[in-house]
Amino acid sequence: MLPTVTILLFSLALCIDGGSSRLTARDVAAKLENYDKTLPPSTNSTKVEIGWYVNSVKMDEDKGVITLDIYLRQSWVDPRLDFGSRSSVRIYSYDTIWIPDLFIRNDRSGSMCAVPAGLKLLRVSRKGAVWYVMKTTIEASCPMHYGRYPKDAQTCYMPHESFGYTADILHLRPMSIPIDIDTNLTLPQFRLLSADTSDCSQNYTTGSYPCLMFAFTMRRTQGWFFFTLVYLPTTIIVLVSSSAFWINVDKVAARLIVGLSTSLTMSVYTGISRAFYPPPAAATYFTLLDVWLTSSVVIVFLAFILQLAAVVSAGLDSKDNSNQEEQKATETSSKLARLRGGILDLVGKILVPALLLLLIIVYAAL
């Protein structure tokens, strides 16, 4: 017979949901008298259903960590706890019955092992159906890949695994609604695309252990941040560089000022823009943002080269010749030189905006 203290504990823990007969502490104590909490409910594979209710999510890109505040739900059937009534029993002594030994493989905090009793709920209902809920905070490692930054999508995986029971003893499967998310949940810089589950059972030297993978996929929201601080300024710089082609070819100084200033500004701005990167991306990745910035630099530099070519071509054969006999030939040569310069200007007027438009279309499609 269980000790008197345990009987009193169960009498306080009973919650009657309905039914014609009322359970007593003596009934519960009698049922648990020969109960062995070290043995799983069945000699066959015990099916444990897992689900989450997600309260909040936080991404730490510097550390490569995702932090989730969740209610971890578990459900299974233990025939030894069939009280033969429609009543349900809430148990506050969580070490009284068998509970799955789950852990999250990449949880850095180990918070599931230190959940206070006040943040747990253990209820047994008809036919031994057990409902076990705990409120916990998971801090899981989440390697991130920034090749498509800032249009990247990050997927964080959290595998739930049994520590001591092999697959022939314990089977993990998702609930009908495996991941339930608070409707008010928001993520800075990200929006949640999907939350899925999959089997991740793995073989070790001691056998095959059951595993259920929870995966969160989040896409970065670019919004006005990148538009106003990256895309718009670089587009303006490229357009300003093309404006030099509309300056008279004789205004060499004005053309050089426009070409040099836009080239230097674009180069400096490219370096400054990397300050917007997450630290891992800034260190090791060539990203989509690098594609945009590098292409913009190339277009501006190409515009500057075309401007120089137009100036040189227009002035190549121009000479200050006072000899009347050679004046006609000089004028003809100057007209041809200006024609070449005008052709290069026309090419620049069309080519630079066309390349910018092509960059915008290709970048948007990536």
Image (cartoon, rainbow, N blue to C red):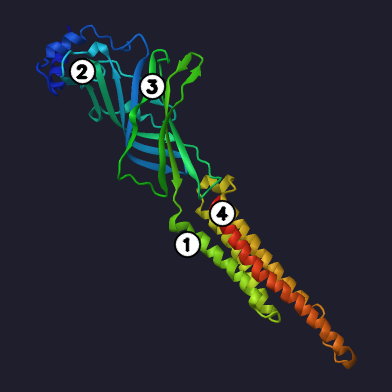
Precedes in sequence: disc 2 or disc 4: 2
Closer mark to the observer between disc 3 and disc 2:
2
Precedes in sequence: disc 1 or disc 2: 2
Distance (Cα) linking label 3 and label 2: 21 Å
Q: Which residue is mark 2?
A: 126
> x, y percentage for residue 123?
22, 22
- Tag of residue 228: 1
Q: Which residue is mark 3?
A: 172
Distance (Cα) linking label 3 and label 1: 48 Å
Query: Where, quadrant-wise, is the N terminus in this rendering?
Result: top left
Rendering quarter of residue 73:
top left
Task: Give the structural element (helix, strand or loop) at label 4.
Answer: helix
Residue situated in front as seen by the camera: 92 or 173: 173
Give the amino acid type for the residue marked by disc 1 in the picture: Thr
Precedes in sequence: disc 1 or disc 4: 1
> x, y percentage for residue 140?
42, 34
Residue 159 vs 85, above or below: the answer is: below
Distance (Cα) linking label 1 and label 4: 16 Å
Residue situated in front as seen by the camera: 181 or 206: 181
Residue 29 vs 281, above or below: the answer is: above
